[in-house]
Amino acid sequence: MRARTLAPAGTALRKALYAVALASTLVLAVVVLSAVWETPPTKPLGVILLATLTYMGSHLLRIARLALLSGDAGLSLRALAKIHLFTSSVSLVTPFKLGELYRMVELSVLTRSPVRGVILVWLERVFDVVVILSLLLLASLFSPAAVTSYLGVLVASLLFVLATLFFV
């Protein structure tokens, strides 16, 4: 089953979005590599490789999470992976979280329900905030003096999760 998306695969818009996502990824890679590779290298290559593998693993976990949240056995894992990876690339290059709107549209088309697409993205963000909140709470256990530096994020994250639990 071929994944239905907003723009058919051969359209100029889709090709332009792929080109922008690829170009911005390459520019970002050059910027990151130039910052990481100092003239005497101080970061071992193993640390960079571990960080890259961790980042790629996090995308695999997010794809699995999206599959679990969608709850539709008719949606293929390949289609969900394509949507996730493509919309993540679009989110990387678009300002003001416009990539999230694009993600909502793509998931709405894939699930054939605009409400379901919005709810899927909202639930993904709730789970992101729960993980961030857990990491911040864990960090506060190991370094209580540093809590003041991220107290605002901690409170905002907690309020977001509580509001979601209360209103949804």
Image (cartoon, grey):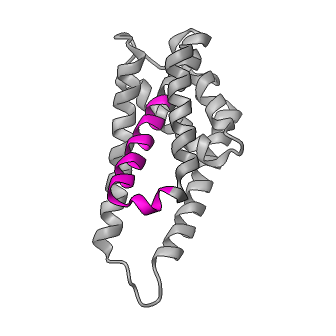
Q: Does 37 appear above or below 81?
A: below
**Residue 77 visible, this angle:** yes
- Please name the residue shown 55% across and 44% down the image: 89
Question: Mainly helix, strand or loop, the magenta region?
Answer: helix
The segment highlighted magenta reads 126-147
> Which of the two residues, 40 or 96, is positioned nearer the viewer here?
96
Front-most of 43 and 159? Answer: 159
Snapshot quadrant of residue 16: top right
**Residue 129 colored in magenta in the image:** yes
Horizontally, residue 152 falls left or right of residue 141, namely right
Measuring from the top left, give residue 9's x and y in whole percent.
Answer: 58, 28
Q: Is residue 8 visible?
A: no
Does residue 92 appear to the left or right of 124 in the view shown?
right
Identify the residue at image location x=56%, y=55%.
25
Tell me if residue 140 comes above or below residue 104 in the rendering. below
Q: Residue, x 31% and y 69% (percent of image)? A: 47
Residue 142 occupies quadrant: bottom left
Looking at the picture, does residue 46 appear above or below residue 132? below
Along the horizontal axis of the image, is 85 left or right of 137?
Answer: right
Query: x%, y% of residue 152?
Result: 58, 48
